[in-house]
């Protein structure tokens, strides 16, 4: 949606397909980080975005046996928006779609499911999609797969990828939230268990982190193990844990981590989770996907507008975005190895090493986690040429 908006504003004809009738999907990632807030500002959308109901997160905490430890304090970042905004993803998508529809070169097709690529003479020339029982074809100079970690288009292109091995899956569910509850996003760590609590105004979005392969076994026997573990690590939720009565209330996120070795074919490009599935650690997936979109728009708007797209343009996007992807996945893997594996294998409540706690108190090192999560290695913004083209076409 972001790529479509940017290209359409620059005068490129764009069609975006969404296979569902709306954007509502519960338990989608909803973290909008400082880099994305700055981008929305530059696009003139920040006031409309901040008018959406949202939660401001200024720090991330881990609650351990030694008490709460702040691992990322975004208020120290030297940026206009030193915080993470939690906004339902469907609200963000609706905002971007409404803005994109203001341009004559943008078309959004709902309930249109991408099915396969059209290829001729070794190049992708279009895409088939299904509307109801009818399959249709749209031809294009470029087809972009932004259809997530289970991308049909990417798989159809048979692009090679490397798989990582995240040691966890996540069980998502909701519990009531009281006005007196904390507003911070927190990671609760207990003996052999971890829980993430995300403030959703009237309810908590709860992520119960389990070792890879254990989720189905736990759910077969109901939710007793989950409610017992949750009561141990978040006792302040009290009787509210009993609101979780059935496995039907729980959604399993099978955590993946992978990246394509090649993001493109002639006439075809993968971005976001289709190019690199991220784990939930740090909530960076959405923001990396948006940064992919901006980098792609910076590279593609002129050759697409002038009908002069070359393979080198697609190669350039992969070159630019591979490094931040590799770094983000390496950091996620390090956290998973040092924290998750330790928690799952421990028979006692973990304590963060004193040296680690001291390092987090030093200003130079203290801000590194917030920068890595909030801004990333290579934040992307519209180039001067793209910004001028968008301004001229409005």
Image: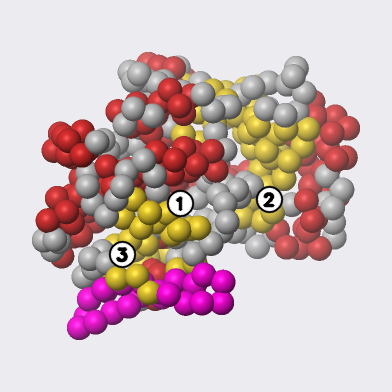
Residue beneath disc 3 = 143
Residue closest to the eye, 170 or 314? 314
Q: Is residue 191 visible?
A: no
Identify which residue is drawn at 68% across, 21% down. 182
The colour scheme of the drawn protein is secondary structure
The spot of residue 26 in percent (x, y) is 64, 47
| Mark 1 closeness class: few <14, some 14–19, many ≥20 residues within 10 Å | many
Residue closest to the eye, 232 or 203? 203
Q: Earlier in the sequence, mark 2 or mark 3?
A: 3
Residue beneath disc 1 = 278
Q: Distance of mark 2 from mark 3, alpha carbons?
A: 34 Å
The spot of residue 1 in percent (x, y) is 40, 48
Which residue range is magenta in the image?
A: 116-136
The spot of residue 155 in percent (x, y) is 41, 73
- Disc 1, SS: loop
| Mark 3 closeness class: few <14, some 14–19, many ≥20 residues within 10 Å | many
Is residue 392 left or right of 288 when viewed as pictured?
left
- What main secondary structure does the magenta stretch of the protein show? strand
Q: Distance of mark 3 from mark 1, alpha carbons?
A: 22 Å
Identify which residue is drawn at 85% across, 40% down. 243
């Amino acid at each position: 949606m972001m790529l479509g908006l940017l290209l359409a504003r620059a005068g490129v004809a764009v069609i975006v397909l969404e296979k569902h009738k709306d954007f509502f999907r519960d338990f989608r990632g909803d973290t909008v980080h400082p880099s994305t807030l700055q981008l929305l500002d530059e696009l003139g959308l920040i006031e409309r975005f901040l008018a959406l109901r949202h939660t401001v997160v200024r720090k991330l905490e881990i609650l351990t046996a030694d008490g709460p430890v702040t691992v990322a304090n975004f208020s120290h970042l030297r940026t206009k928006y030193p915080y993470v905004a939690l906004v339902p993803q469907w609200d963000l998508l609706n905002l971007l779609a409404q803005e994109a529809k203001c341009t004559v070169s943008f078309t959004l097709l709902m309930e249109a499911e991408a099915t396969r690529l059209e290829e001729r003479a070794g190049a992708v020339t279009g895409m088939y999609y299904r509307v109801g029982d009818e399959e249709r074809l749209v031809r294009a100079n470029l087809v972009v797969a932004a259809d997530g970690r289970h991308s049909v288009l990417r798989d159809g292109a048979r692009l090679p990828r490397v798989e990582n091995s995240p040691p966890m899956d996540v069980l998502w569910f909701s519990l009531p939230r009281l006005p007196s509850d904390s507003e911070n996003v927190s990671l609760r760590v207990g003996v052999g268990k971890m829980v993430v609590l995300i403030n959703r105004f009237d309810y908590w979005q709860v992520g119960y982190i389990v070792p890879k392969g254990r989720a189905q076994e736990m759910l077969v026997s109901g939710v007793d193990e989950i409610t017992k573990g949750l009561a141990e690590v978040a006792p302040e939720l009290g009787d509210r844990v009993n609101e979780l009565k059935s496995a039907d209330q729980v959604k399993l996120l099978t955590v993946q981590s992978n990246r394509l070795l090649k993001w493109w074919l002639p006439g075809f490009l993968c971005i976001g989770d289709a190019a690199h599935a991220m784990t939930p650690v740090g909530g960076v997936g959405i923001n990396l996907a948006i940064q992919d979109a901006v980098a792609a728009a910076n590279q593609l708007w002129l050759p697409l507008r002038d009908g002069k797209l070359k393979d080198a343009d697609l190669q350039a996007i992969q070159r630019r975005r591979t490094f931040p992807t590799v770094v983000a996945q390496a950091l996620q893997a390090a956290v998973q190895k040092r924290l998750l594996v330790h928690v799952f294998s421990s028979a006692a409540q973990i304590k963060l090493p004193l040296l680690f706690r001291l390092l987090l108190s030093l200003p130079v090192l203290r801000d590194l986690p917030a920068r890595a999560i909030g801004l990333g290695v290579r934040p992307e913004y519209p180039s001067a040429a793209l910004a001028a083209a968008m301004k001229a076409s409005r």
